Image (cartoon, rainbow, N blue to C red):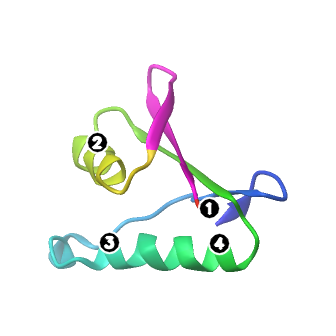
Amino acid sequence: MSCESLEIGRVERMSVIKNYRRAGLAKRMIASLEIWAKEQGYRQLVLETNNDWYSAINFYKDRQYQRYLNDGMCSHFKKSLS
């Protein structure tokens, strides 16, 4: 994770090896990242994914990430941690 500002963290890349998908690992990873980020004082997380990665887009939407920008190639998401 990198820092956008003192209160906004960015998830750079997150994936699960294909053989281990559908086992809940991504849910645990993002939940752990959110807890850690909140403990570090971040108030918001942002991330992006390719527009044609529908499973990733749905995954983030299911975790209450809100799309705030579609630049034509990527969808950008944010989530408040407060």
Q: Which mark is residue 82?
A: 1
Q: Secondary structure at mark 1?
A: loop
Residue 18 at x, y percent in the picture: 20, 69
Amino acid type of the residue tagged 1 in the rendering:
Ser
Q: Earlier in the sequence, mark 2 or mark 4?
A: 4
Residue 54 at x, y percent in the picture: 24, 41
Disc tally is 4
| Residue located beneath label 2 in the image | 53
x 33%, y 46%: residue: 61
Q: Earlier in the sequence, mark 3 or mark 1?
A: 3
**Magenta stretch encompasses residue 26:** no
Alpha carbon separation for disc pair 3 and 2: 17 Å
Alpha carbon separation for disc pair 3 and 4: 15 Å
| Residue located beneath label 4 in the image | 37
Question: Between tags 2 and 4, which lies in front?
Answer: 4
| Residue located beneath label 3 in the image | 27
Alpha carbon separation for disc pair 1 and 2: 28 Å
Amino acid type of the residue tagged 3 in the rendering:
Lys
Q: Quadrant of residue 30?
A: bottom left
Amino acid type of the residue tagged 4 in the rendering:
Ala
- Within-10-Å neighbours for mark 1: few <14, some 14–19, many 20+: few
Question: Between tags 1 and 4, which lies in front?
Answer: 1
* Start-end of magenta stretch: 66-80
